[in-house]
Image (cartoon, rainbow, N blue to C red):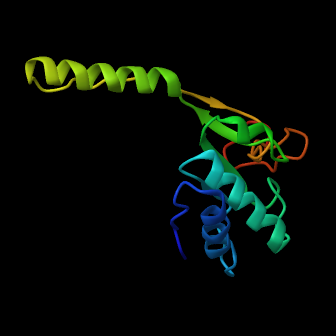
Amino acid sequence: MITEANGNFEFEAGIAAGRQLLDVADRPTAIFATNDDSAAGVMTACTQLGIAVPDAVSICGFDDNFVAKRVWPYLTTVYQPIAELARQAANLLLDRRADNRETANVLLAHRMVERDTIRDLRVSEKVRRPVKGDDDA
């Protein structure tokens, strides 16, 4: 099974990568794309191949940019603070240039933004099959 494909951070490359990952007999049930543009391309590949999102495949992007709410279903993604990221990077470069010291690692806040492209795998108690060892089994 193919486990990765290069979406090159672009919509069109995301389509090609999505087709590469999904146009196989043993296709994945979830795809994490490196950014929202690539994820939107994967969603387009799903449409082209007749694959339902999120019922047949879940898709998650990264960035939470404007694309995430311009596609349907709305894209689940990881938010990262782009403006703060740029500010911190510039400060680290300026600090390094000023005194030639090693740069520090900086962890910025990020979070999952749940929308509509991830299938909920939790099974309702009403239809859940008993598992060996359950009290009510």
**Is 65 displayed left or right of 49 in the figure?**
left
**Is 112 displayed left or right of 54 in the figure?**
left
Pinpoint residue 78: horizontal percent, then vertical percent.
59, 35
The quadrant the C terminus occupies is: top right
Image quadrant where residue 52 sits: bottom right
Q: Is residue 88 above or below residue 70?
A: above
Residue occupying image coordinates x 65% and y 39% = 77
Residue occupying image coordinates x 51% and y 65% = 6
Pinpoint residue 10: horizontal percent, then vertical percent.
59, 56
Pinpoint residue 80: horizontal percent, then vertical percent.
53, 29
**Residue 83 visible at all:** yes
Residue occupying image coordinates x 55% and y 76% = 1
Pinpoint residue 15: horizontal percent, then vertical percent.
68, 66
Q: In front: 24, or 102?
A: 102
Q: In front: 27, or 96?
A: 96
Q: Is residue 50 above or below residue 76?
A: below
Q: Is residue 117 above or below residue 112?
A: below
